[in-house]
Image (cartoon, helix red, strand yellow):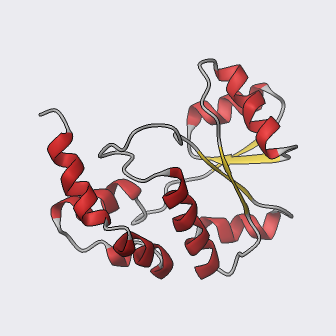
């Protein structure tokens, strides 16, 4: 797990959950609360019980967004991200940015696709996350959302 490597380098781990105010879609089917629960389960599976998880506010302006993140989280020394725009925005504010490289075989998109199409998905996520996904009926939700998407 990528976060285990970060843990060796960081004193405190802060995880931001974005897109917390949008309606459920095929690409973003889970509420902020459900994503918090999945992240917490994955962290416990990785023996990292003390990370902080914050909802990241939405803004209409990029520079306002970084300020809103920092107001929410408090001071940050380093941002780890795989998102080029996020990395650039934090660099512009003078914050160190480390790029997270894609890990082969780990893909939320692939998990969502398999949930939707009935494929084997549970081996792609930590046990705790699989438990949460089963409990909330993720497979049924994905199929329901597919029916709501424009063709």
Q: Is residue 17 left or right of residue 49?
A: left
Is 38 on the left or on the right of 3, as rendered? left
Kindly identify the residue that appears in the image at 47 percent across and 73 percent down. 129
Relative to the observer, which residue lies in front, 19 or 124? 19
Q: Position of residue 60 (x, y in %)?
A: 59, 19
Q: Is residue 76 above or below residue 5?
A: above
Q: Residue 5, relative to residue 54: is it above or below?
A: below
| Residue found at x 40% / y 59% | 107
Q: Exactly how many numbered labels are in the figure?
A: 0
Quarter of the rendering containing residue 104: bottom left
Between residues 141 and 103, which one lies in front from this camera angle?
Answer: 141
**Residue 81 % position (x, y):** 62, 46
- Relative side of 19 to 61, left or right: left
- Horizontal and vertical percent position of residue 116: 21, 59
Where is residue 5 drawn, in percent x and y?
A: 69, 68
In the rendered image, the quadrant that contains the C terminus is: top left
Q: Residue furthest left?
A: 151
The residue located at (53%, 42%) in the rendering is 20
Rendered view: 97 above or below 53: above
Most distant residue in the top direction: 61
Q: Nearer the viewer, residue 79 or 136?
A: 136
Q: Quadrant of the N terminus?
A: bottom right
Going by the image, does 117 lie left or right of 41? left
Residue in the picture at 52% in, 66% down: 38
């Amino acid at each position: 797990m990528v976060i285990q490597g970060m843990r060796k380098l960081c004193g405190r781990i802060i995880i931001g959950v974005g897109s917390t105010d949008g309606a459920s879609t095929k690409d973003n089917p889970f509420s902020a609360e459900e994503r918090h629960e999945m992240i917490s389960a994955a962290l416990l599976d990785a023996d990292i019980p003390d990370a902080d998880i914050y909802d990241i506010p939405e803004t209409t302006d990029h520079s306002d967004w970084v300020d809103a993140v920092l107001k929410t989280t408090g001071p940050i020394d380093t941002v780890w991200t795989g998102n080029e725009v996020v990395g650039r925005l934090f660099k512009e504010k003078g914050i160190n940015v480390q790029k997270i490289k894609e890990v082969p075989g780990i893909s939320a998109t692939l998990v969502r696709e398999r949930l939707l199409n009935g494929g084997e998905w549970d081996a792609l996520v930590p046990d705790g996350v699989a438990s949460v996904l089963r409990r909330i009926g993720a497979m049924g939700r994905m199929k329901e959302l597919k029916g709501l998407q424009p063709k």
